[in-house]
Image (cartoon, grey):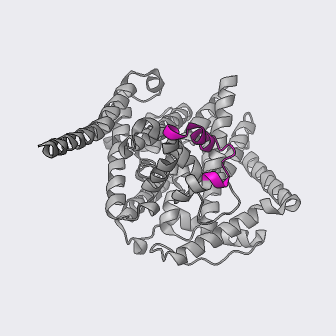
Amino acid sequence: MSFQGNSDFKTCIFVLMAVVSFLFPVLLFFGIVTMISKSNLFQSSPFSTRSLQFAFFLRILSSLVVYYIYSEYYTVRAEADTFKYFDDSYHMSKAFWHHPIDFFQMLFGIDCNTTYFQVNYFNDMSNWVRSYDNGLLNDNRLVIRFNALIRIFSFGNYHVHTLIFNLIAFLGSISMGTVFYAVSKSKLKSYLAVFIIPSVVFWSSGIFKESILLFALGVFLFHFYQTCQGKWSKKRGVILMATLCILIVMKLYVFLAFFPACVCYFMSKNREKHYSIYVSTYGIFLLLGIGLAGIAPQYSFVNLIVDKQRDFINLSHFFEVNSAFSMDYLEPKLWSLIKASPEAILNVFTKPWLKEVNSLLFIPPLIENILLFILLFFSFLWRKKLTSNQARFVFLCLFFTIVVYLIIGLTTPITGALVRYKIPVAPFLWFGILMILNTHKFPIDLRKNKLYKWFHSYL
């Protein structure tokens, strides 16, 4: 009887835990949706509450698709991107309850590179140490640390983590969209660029690095733009520095492409030839990079790109990646990079090609590329005369895109990785092209269409 009672108690506990595990993320989701309708943070954006709630709902649907795909088709969790950082964070978070000093040392990176931490925590993690080390900051650790922090109140519920990651990416998108609207005065163009691009929504809706990256890009852009409008404050300066640090840690190449573009935007104010400012400033940054390589060869950007490409090619061969394509090894010379640049940009801009579609995941980016080419065609056909500020911002978008495309095109021999790595610049590229498009030249039947008018009013 006692045994039976004990069994019933365990069953009740199991059922209770299952119910809590389901209800916790559901309640958190409705809490976020309610916050979107009530909080001044969201109401101050140019978009309606309904459209923001819809955009967040799209993200949650996408996160469920991510969960299903990585659960069913990537059975090795240590290699599944949306699970591996989440799983590794368990070993750090358990220290919070038993050895809190250890936890905070690991969280802030204070004197934790010792045998003690290696034996008790890091050896149990699969991604604390990367499979290759190119001398740059390890962005894996920031994602693991962030997950470990969330675990304090998430009780290890994966879906709670995805909701938090979606929320921070969403905040980045809103910040970015607010700037896009301030530049374009078009809700439609701004909304499409930040909330509707399928690849951006998909790759920033799970426990991915892109979620944090999108947050840092959007928040930095918002406060940078406000600063350019003369709205400077010490608080804004702290936020700018903090988001810049996140960009440097997460993706150094994004920072190296984005920061000069922002400098150019700032310098080109009250200048007529905006493009000349961008070309000359990027040229100066290039010369500084060459000069730094002469003083400190370990920081040579040429060698970093060559080493990164070599590591990527070797990894693609070792794991026999299905979407890998042939790429000649670069030489540690600037001229080698220059010669390979046209093909590199073309690959990033056009892949995946139709013959490379060997997975369902490649169909959305293929359709996305086709739509982008159609948009490009009509943007040149129905060009809009831009104001000075709009032209400066379009140059920021395009130069940022070109430099990121160039870096990932030179280093990445895997189509799947190309699709994912260009996520940070996708909103800027789409917005830059949409800015050029004159919607007033649309056929009058389209502009008077009830659905077209409703969508405008909905935003």
Question: Is residue 11 shown to the viewer in this render?
Answer: yes
Q: How many marks?
A: 0
Outermost residue, right side: 295
Image vertical order of residue 405 relative to residue 232, above or below: below
Q: Tell me which residue sits at (59%, 33%) in the image.
A: 222
Q: Is residue 286 magenta?
A: no
Q: Position of residue 303 (x, y in %)?
A: 75, 67
* Foreground pick, 44 / 203: 203
Q: Is residue 259 left or right of residue 298?
A: left
Task: Report the quarter where the C terminus lies.
Answer: top left
Q: Is residue 360 left or right of residue 288?
A: left
Task: Report the quarter where the N terminus lies.
Answer: top left
The picture quadrant where one finds residue 118 is bottom right
Q: Is residue 109 magenta?
A: yes
Q: Position of residue 151 (x, y in %)?
A: 45, 40
* Foreground pick, 178 / 80: 80
* Foreground pick, 186 / 42: 42
Q: Which residues are magenta?
A: 96-117
Q: Position of residue 309 (x, y in %)?
A: 64, 69
Q: Is residue 112 left or right of residue 366?
A: right
The picture quadrant where one finds residue 32 is top left
Image vertical order of residue 138 relative to residue 164, above or below: below
Q: Position of residue 270 (x, y in %)?
A: 74, 33
Question: Is residue 386 shown to the viewer in this render?
Answer: no
* Foreground pick, 154 / 403: 154
Magenta-colored segment: predominant secondary structure: helix
Outermost residue, front side: 2
Image vertical order of residue 215 relative to residue 253, above or below: above
